[in-house]
Amino acid sequence: MLSLETLKTLASKVGIDDVGVAVARRLDDEATFMDQWINHGLHGNMSYLERNRNLRYDPGQLVPNAQTVIVCLLTYEHSGHDYHRALKSKLYELEALLIEQGYCTASDTQNKFCDSAPFLERRWAVEAGLGWIGRNHQLIHPTLGSYVHIGELVITEPVEAPSGKSAQSLCGTCTRCIEACPGQALGQNEWDARKCKAYITHKCTICQQVCPFNEHIKSI
C-alpha cells in the first residue's frame, strides 16, 4: 500500500508544493451546509452550484469505486498564468509515477480535477490535512497560506492515510479579513457571494492580502 511519505516524495518530484490524502466518501455535513447556503440564496448567480449536487458531495459518483482522494497544492508563484494547465499536468505526471510503481491503475474515467468539475476542493483539502477554511472562506495552509491552487487525483486503491482529525483552524480571534472586506460579504461562518467584490468583479483579493498567514508569501 502507498504510504503518505512515499506519496509526498513522488509529488515533490513533479513539483507539487504539498499533498495529502483522504478516504473517499460522501461529505454529509458539508452537503447539509451547502444545501442551506444555496437555499438562502447566498450563492448569488452561481446557478451551477444548484446542479449536480450528488456529484459534488460524493467523489464516488464521479469516479466509480473511488477509495482515495489525493489532494495536491500548487502555489500561485509556481502556477504561472494558467493554473489549470500547470496543476493538471502535474496531476497527470503524479498519476503516471503511481501507475509505474504499481500503486494504482489507469482510470477508465476522468479522475483528475482542478476547478473543472463539481468537486468540493477546499473541503477535501481540509479532509486531507492540508489546512483549514479561514474566515475569508479560503483554504489556509499553515506555511503556504491561502495563495494556493487545489487539484485532486481520485484513485480506486487505498492509501495509508494518517489517523486523526482534519487540520484545525489557527485563525484564533483574528478577524482582519472580515473587517477589511469592502463588500461586507464575510461573517464568522458565512460568505455572501452577492456582496463579494471578487465574485462581482473577479479582481478583489483583499481578504487574502490582510491574512497573517500570507504576510511572508508572494501572491503572484
Image: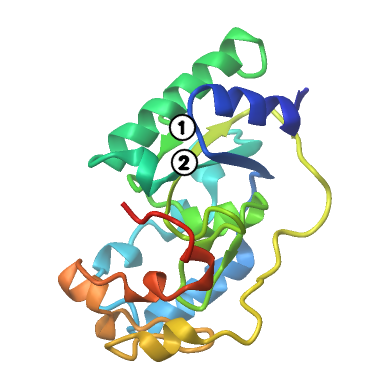
Front one among 212 and 58: 212
**Cα distance between the residues tagged 2 and 1:** 8 Å
**Percent position (x, y) of residue 186?**
41, 85
Query: What residue is at 76 percent from the left and 40 percent from the top?
Result: 161
User: Residue 192 sits in which quadrant?
Assistant: bottom left
Image quarter where the N terminus lies is top right
Can residue 109 be seen here? no
Label 1 sits on residue: 111
Q: Is residue 136 visible?
A: yes
Nearer the observer: mark 2 or 1; the answer is 1
Task: Point out residue 67 in the picture as x, y percentages from the top left corner.
Answer: 66, 36
**Residue 198, percent across and down?**
25, 72
Is there a contact, CB below 8 Å, between mark 2 and mark 1?
yes
Number of other residues with Cα within 10 Å of mark 1, as a class: few under 14, some 14 to 19, many 20 or more: many
Q: Which residue is mark 2?
A: 62
Q: Helix, strand or loop at disc 2?
A: loop
Whichever of labels 2 and 1 marks the residue nearer the N terminus, that label is 2
Q: Residue furthest front?
A: 216
**Residue 91, position in %: x, y?**
45, 29
Q: Is residue 171 above or below residue 24?
A: below
Name above or below for residue 184 compared with residue 110: below
Q: Is residue 216 above or below residue 177?
A: above
As helix, strand or loop, the secondary structure at mark 1 comes to loop
Q: Nearer the viewer, residue 174 or 67?
A: 174
User: Given the image, on which type of amino acid does mark 1 rest?
Assistant: Asn
Residue furthest to the right: 163
